[in-house]
Amino acid sequence: MFSVAGGPGGLAQTQHVKEAGQGWVWEWFWSLPGTVKAPLPQGLMGCSLSAGSAGSSASSEFPGQVLELLRGVQRGSEDRRRWLGRLRWALQNEDTQQKFVRLDGSIRTLTGLFTSSLAELQLEAARCLHELSHSSVPAVAEACLPVTSYLLTYLSGHSLELTELCLYTLGNLVVESEAVRKQLLPQGIIPVLASCIQSPHEAVLEGVGYVLSQLLQAKEAPTEIIPLVLDSALPQHMLQLVCSGLKAAMGAAVEFAWCLHYIICRHKDNELLLALGAVPALTSLLLDLAAQIPPEAPEGLELLVCPVLRCLSNLLAQTDCQRPDRRLLIALFLILQCFLQQHPFLIHECLWLLNNLTADDPSCCSALLSLDLLPALLQLLTCSQMGTVLVLTVLCNVAEKGRFQCQQLLQQPLLAQLLPLLTLPDPEAVGQCLELLHLLFLHCPEAAAEFTRQGGHQALEQHQGTPELQERAQALLDMVRQPPGAPSACQATLAASS
């Protein structure tokens, strides 16, 4: 089975082992993907006053100029909002950000204005804090520690603009600084997010998803953050929002789908999500998607499909997981057909899930054959290097179930399609091809003779000098050299164990 992990920024490395009487077990070990900070949300940009046009790139300010901006902001004059606008524009530059936080009283001044009763000044100060949150320098994020409690407080306020600004500022700050994350946890960020996730506003929901996804990617998440999330009301709300993503709040559904993925792949025990009905709920979502999907999928839909597929793949790796509706097989191939050209990365996602479906479920393997999905699967044999390995793995899962399944596989021109794969430079693909041939010859000895007639003998001989392949290649050569009707050593072992 696959246990898929990773994130939007990439995938972790894999290991795979074969267990007796089971399909191939694939484990994807989670690695922290490259985090991407959120820009200021649309509609919250405000005005860029005096210092230049909104589309300009801020240049680095000299220390004296930064001090002048701070003093302008500190003056209790009517021009204070204009000075804040100039400061916000200047803080788009990383050097200026570092100069600013080193100035005595800079963060204290911004905090005072951020907590002001004057809404315009408060919003402009919030925008300045948001610019600081974009810094990739941990010291800048840590300079903002005094303001985190206020950012949390204003999440329960009445201003939608301010709530959204606070969410994205928090999300950006937790990316760079463990100190910020460690301060936010006792300050109650998880209960606050659990309250915010019940907001009727899509923009707020998307912001909550962004903050939560950044927290769940932190290195300390498995021990310090995920348990708190699972003990809150967040999981059930996340699941509901993901499953309603086709009807509304697509952006929020995408964020929370990735959140669920980070929880599932980094937490060993997913009993809570299983008890909440995550497998049937996510399966139903994919069935609805496959039934409604237009000829040209709407832009961004693939961003929801990807984490949903991964969540199901990992949940299916749980030993006590309820097996999903077999209609999911058809849905997977419809999704493949839809996204094949524009988003080929989804081929791998679908194949990982298909592997988990077939690894330990003979009925699912039978359904794959009886629903006549095998020709579509074989078309993916050469889609990519990874795709080749994945398709071969699924075929191994089917072939391992016995003679009847192998006979049905051989009704397709499978041997002819496997021959070119033996010449590939990828040892993993060749090794998986050898494993499939072994299963076919084991259960259907007549396949070995046909393979020889097609020139397979020579294809096997070329791997006798490859260290990681030579043992398996030699075993197959011994099988194809057996006289017709004579049981091979492997067949004798199989008969003795049955």
Image (cartoon, rainbow, N blue to C red):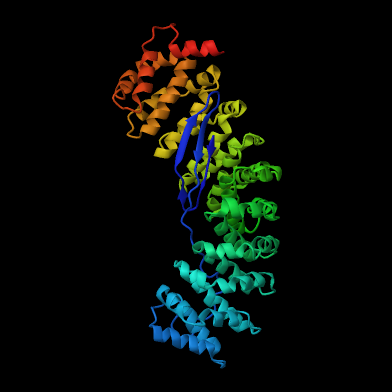
State the quadrant of the C terminus: top right
Q: Is residue 490 left or right of residue 263?
A: left
**Residue drawn at 51 percent across, 69 percent down:** 142
Image coordinates for residue 51, horizontal then vertical, percent: 44, 84
Picture quadrant of residue 196: bottom right
**Residue drawn 45% across the image and 8% down it:** 487
Residue 416 drawn above or below residue 40: above
The answer to whether residue 244 of the structure is visible from this angle is no
Q: Which residue: 56% across, 44% down?
A: 309
Number of numbered labels in the structure image = 0
Camera-side residue of 190 and 93:
190
Closer to the camera, 337 or 391?
391
> Which one is nearer the viewer's eye here, 358 or 98?
98
* Quadrant occupied by the N terminus: top right
Residue 82 at x, y = what percent? 52, 87
Instruction: Residue 108 in the image: state x and y as whole percent.
Output: 55, 80
> In terms of depth relative to the viewer, which is nearer, 76 or 441?
76
Q: Where does the image place residue 90, in percent across and percent down from the top left? A: 44, 79
Residue 257 vertical placement versus 313 (above, below): below
- Residue 70 seen in the current view: yes
